Image (spheres, rainbow, N blue to C red):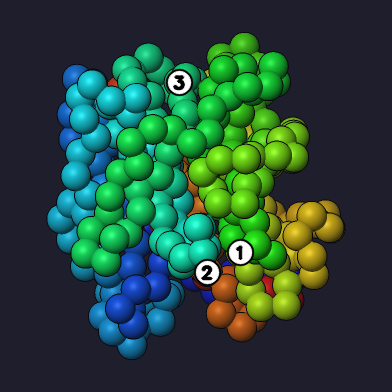
Amino acid sequence: MRARLLDKTRLFDGADVTVLRSDDRWCLIMGELVDPAVHRIDLRAAHLPRGAAVDSLEWTVDGPCASPTPANGWDATGYHCVSHVRGRSGGQSVERLYYASSAAATDITGPYSIGFLEWDGSGWVRHPAPVFTATEPWELGTVAEPNLLYHDGRWRLWYCAGLSVGSTQVIGYAESPDGVTGWTGRRIFAADGEFDAVVVDCGGAFDLVTAKHPLTAAPGAGDGVWWSRADEVGDWPAPVQLVSTTDGTPWHRDGVWKPSAVREGDDLVVFFNGSRREGYSPGLSVGRAHYRVG
């Protein structure tokens, strides 16, 4: 495999982006910290002009795109690390935004559970209860960073587990017939410092994009965004590093994570979080890297 960087750009302030195509144009949804007292994350959207390619820089940032979570809900801290997916459930085509959340703010380790919003034709409607919670000892009571792919009649979930200041997180995997219940095949998918894993169906093959981000230590040269391609889900060759956190780029010098990827032909466009800490602020921004891959 090879990957040639065509462009890498900081787009705007924000975090936790998921990219989708809607109404004949590219859109993205991202988190915005609106209440620092309780660390509540709301969702806002951005869009490109109709006809613009996904690597365009002509993004227009819109306002909120979903109602805030209730103050007394299991997800009172809002919509963390949102992930867009289309699939089928109950014989119907559905469109969802999965997210992680918690009832109260502690620190980055949670504990988190995973739920979703579903599109009803005019807006995003919150499912009232979490649909995926920690049950395995290696998950250490928290599941976060959901990324989903609907493939071969199954909702396939990759997620971050084992968040703890005393251990290294892992990526877990599970699948469900409807994306709500009946989760099976739960197992550790990756355990080499990955913080996120997202799989993209590129028509006849699949791209796996992961991000490595240490929870408490300083980033090293191996941290950043990695890519692999396979003909079948689960048969991944050795990955290629696309972005190194420590390559000297100022706006992501302190962390790179939460990738969202789009494949168009031989082009792979990856959106991701970048961090440049200033005092107590994580200095979060959204970046985009465009590659020619093969």
* Quarter containing the N terminus: bottom right
Which residue lies at the image location 19% right of the left edge and 44% below the top edge? Answer: 67
Q: Are marks 2 and 1 in contact (CB under 8 Å)?
A: yes
Q: Residues within 10 Å of mark 1 (few under 14, many from 20)?
A: many
Where does residue 82 sit, x and y in percent of width and height? 41, 46
Q: Which residue is mark 1?
A: 200
Question: Could you tell which of marks 2 and 3 lies nearer the N-terminus?
Answer: 3
Separation of residues labelled 2 and 3 (CA atoms):
29 Å
Q: Are marks 3 and 1 in contact (CB under 8 Å)?
A: no
Q: Which residue is mark 2?
A: 262
Which residue lies at the image location 58% right of the left edge and 24% below the top edge? Answer: 134
Where does residue 10 sit, x and y in percent of width and height? 37, 58
Residue type of the residue flagged with mark 2:
Val
Foreground pick, 252 / 294: 294
Which residue lies at the image location 30% right of the left edge and 78% below the top edge? Answer: 23
Foreground pick, 162 / 74: 74
Q: Is residue 277 visible?
A: no
Where does residue 273 sit, x and y in percent of width and height? 43, 47
- Badge 3 marks a residue whose secondary structure is loop
Q: Which residue is mark 3?
A: 110
Separation of residues labelled 2 and 1 (CA atoms):
7 Å
Foreground: disc 2 or disc 1: 1
Residue type of the residue flagged with mark 1:
Val
Q: Residues within 10 Å of mark 2 (few under 14, many from 20)?
A: many
Question: Could you tell which of marks 2 and 1 lies nearer the N-terminus?
Answer: 1
Q: Is residue 176 visible?
A: yes
Foreground pick, 218 / 130: 130
